Amino acid sequence: MANNVLSNGRIQQQPIISQRLTRNEKGKKVLEIPAIESKNWLLHRHYTRHEYKTCKILIDQELTKSNGHSEYANYLKGLILRREGKIQDSLNCFQAAYNINSTNVNNMKQIAKSFLIMGNHKHAVDVFLEAEKILKTPDWEIYFNLGECYTKLNQLHEAKKYLRRSIELTKNELPYILLARTYLLEDNVTEAQNAYTAALSQNPESIDAATELGLLYLKIGDVQRAFQQFGTAIAHSPNYTKAMLPIAYIIQAISCLKRAHYLNSMAFLPAYNLGMVFLTTGQPASAAIYLCAAVSADSKNPMPYLLLGLALKRLDDLEGAEKVLQKAHALSPQDPLILINYAIILEAQGKRNIAAEFLTALNDITAVIDVDSQITQIAKKLSMKIRLEKTNKQEEEPRILNSDEV
């Protein structure tokens, strides 16, 4: 029954094939036809171990054996040559891999990346778009690279469109960072800051995002938050030079100022600048010490009083802050920065009516001179808060009835 087969419902007899070999056949071996891709696993192992020299030798053997028709060997050789800086040679390898298998999207991606590295951004866009057409599932990396190409071509609207699409598909920080850089090309600091913050929320250990956000803060003068971001980057990578250099810059500025103050402790500028630096780097106690020295050096200058008031406020000494702000206001009664900070401190102490008077004075000044938009926005929010607090207080207080009311 073992040698019978079922055909059209009938059992048919098959000829019995002898399992025994003749003497002549015993010495013969079955002809082995090696598969072209039989050593892909070995190539992959050497490549992932970064054993590129050994990998290249095996790749050349495979290409010689297959007459250049090994897709994976060509692909890996292209990656290795790119690492060696031989971009044109690597492009030739990727094109050879594509000629063997034009349906593999990875071959097209590497061809497009080669064009991108070579600065041929228009050709890179064309190839990436062709690769997108044959995708079975969306690929964040293709959209990211399209965003990079369009950024290089200064087509920022298209760049942002593809980068946002890439962000929808991945938590990788690369599209977030490039989107932030694109916003900075448009001088849109707020959106750039939001993009960097989003990158860090998805990748808290991203040293590139932390460093670039720190540089952005440093650019807009927010030294304290810049210092924090550089510190975060160095905490994750102690030898990261991009974060070490700006931190060294900030620390060197402090060291130079300390030296200047040591040489002339009665000079105004070293003491004042040290107080300002310590205040912006989140060290209010140290700031207060140097700002007191600045006040002693120039008692007619309102700015050290203002900064000293801010330092005391951060130290929760609201009464002391009010006294020095009062002095600053006496020296410069129409300074918008002094007015808004004085009003904030008064409101924090519950002196809402007096705070409202200072806000009214500030409003009158804005009608005459240009005032920083940040000051006016804070003033509006503080005015609304004072009005709301007054309304709530009136509702809570019991109303005394008249004699004719029940």
Image (cartoon, helix red, strand yellow):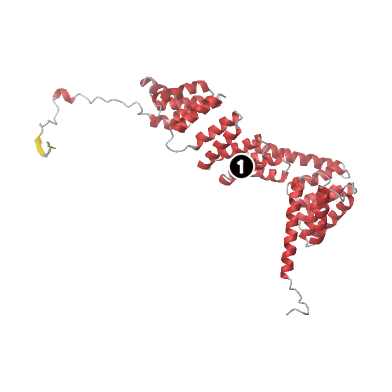
Residue 313 occupies quadrant: bottom right
* Front-lying residue, 106 or 165: 165
Quarter the N terminus occupies: top left
Q: Does residue 376 sit above or below 4 in this rendering?
A: below
The spot of residue 206 in percent (x, y) is 58, 42
Q: Does residue 330 sit above or below 181 in this rendering?
A: below
Q: Does residue 366 sit above or below 91 in this rendering?
A: below
The spot of residue 322 in percent (x, y) is 82, 57
Q: In this rendering, does residue 317 appear at all?
A: no
The spot of residue 80 in percent (x, y) is 49, 26
Residue located 48% across and 26% down the image:
111
Tell how many labels: 1
User: Amino acid under label 1?
Assistant: Ala
Residue holding disc 1:
195
Residue located 36% across and 21% down the image:
65
Residue located 64% across and 40% down the image:
192
* Front-lying residue, 341 or 79: 341
Residue 173 occupies quadrant: top right
* Front-lying residue, 364 or 165: 364
